[in-house]
Amino acid sequence: MRLGFLGTGEITAAMVRGLAGQGHSILVSPRNAATAAALAAEVPEVSIAPNEDVVAKSDVVFLCLLARVAEDILPGLPFREGQAIISVMVDAPLVKLRNLCAPATDIASTIPLPPIAQGGCPLPVYPFSPALDALFGARNLILPLANEAALSAHIGASALCSPILDQLQTTADWLSGFTGDAASAEAYVAAMIRAYLPARATRSELAEALRKLSTEGGFNATLRAAMGPAKDDLRRGLNGFRKRLGLPEDGEPN
Ligand SMILES: NC(=O)c1ccc[n+]([C@@H]2O[C@H](COP(=O)([O-])OP(=O)(O)OC[C@H]3O[C@@H](n4cnc5c(N)ncnc54)[C@H](OP(=O)(O)O)[C@@H]3O)[C@@H](O)[C@H]2O)c1
């Protein structure tokens, strides 16, 4: 497939690395210059081209810009009917993208994460995108959603990554303070948590794992109780996204 990326930053680099070696021809825009040059040097399928060519010469165009930059530059680009557009941008509602990318109408929005470079990345998407599925479905977890509000809620939930990684790092640091082996401490903490995580959608694996870790007086139950206020902080932080994400302000989600 002929693929184009507008905005060659952090997330484009990860997606392009995840697509390497699969026979696609990939155009990336010249900014960021250092990232574009690094990708072109590393991935033989990648060429650098002006934004106009990225759009004109691609069957699938990924929008990987900051939303305020997209508003400025997308209207001047030669989008066409029949072209698949996949936005990864937050703060870019579909109604706005349809205006910015007219006359293209096949527009979907998703939220990749940097681990897409290796695969195993969840990709919530609305509306379903056959192009996204064809390109990333084999190595990642495509999650088609029923509406745009569900996608917005996934954007909010994705913010859990950094506080959780922060807690893992804090725990690894605490552990290595006793063992003197930072690398092993990090490997231990990462493998321990990874072992608990369900790979596919399930209704109750997390709850069941928590139930098994609830022995009264046990280390897990004791630490969880000590961190009880953090759970309220998490809910408060997630609810703080509602306005920006266009989610209802009242009541708790089901
Ligand atoms: N990073 C993530 O984990 C992640 C995950 C999901 C979604 N997203 C979304 O993806 C989008 C990009 O995020 P990012 O983290 O990749 O940001 P980033 O690293 O800042 O990338 C944005 C890129 O856009 C380039 N750019 C600026 N003006 C341009 C123009 N006129 N034409 C072409 N390119 C231009 C920037 O180049 P310069 O450096 O030269 O300014 C930069 O390389 C955002 O909307 C973000 O919300 C990011």
Image (cartoon, rainbow, N blue to C red):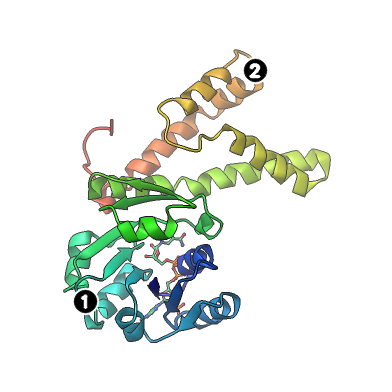
Separation of residues labelled 1 and 2 (CA atoms): 61 Å
Q: Position of residue 237 (x, y in %)?
A: 39, 43
Q: Residue at horizontal 26%, vertical 71%?
A: 83
The foreground one among 191 and 159 is: 191
The foreground one among 40 and 35 is: 40
Q: Residue at horizontal 56%, vertical 74%?
A: 43
Relative height, residue 196 to residue 4 (above, below): above
Q: Which residue is mark 1?
A: 80
Which quadrant, please, contains the N terminus? bottom left
Q: Residue at horizontal 25%, vertical 74%?
A: 71
Q: Is residue 26 visible?
A: yes
Q: Is residue 6 visible?
A: no
Relative height, residue 123 to residue 233 (above, below): below
Residue 78 falls left or right of residue 181: left
Of the numbered discs in the image, which one, if any, rests on residue 7? Answer: none
Q: Residue at horizontal 51%, vertical 34%?
A: 198
Q: Which residue is mark 2?
A: 218
Sequence order check: which comes first, mark 1 or mark 2? 1
Which quadrant, please, contains the C terminus? top left
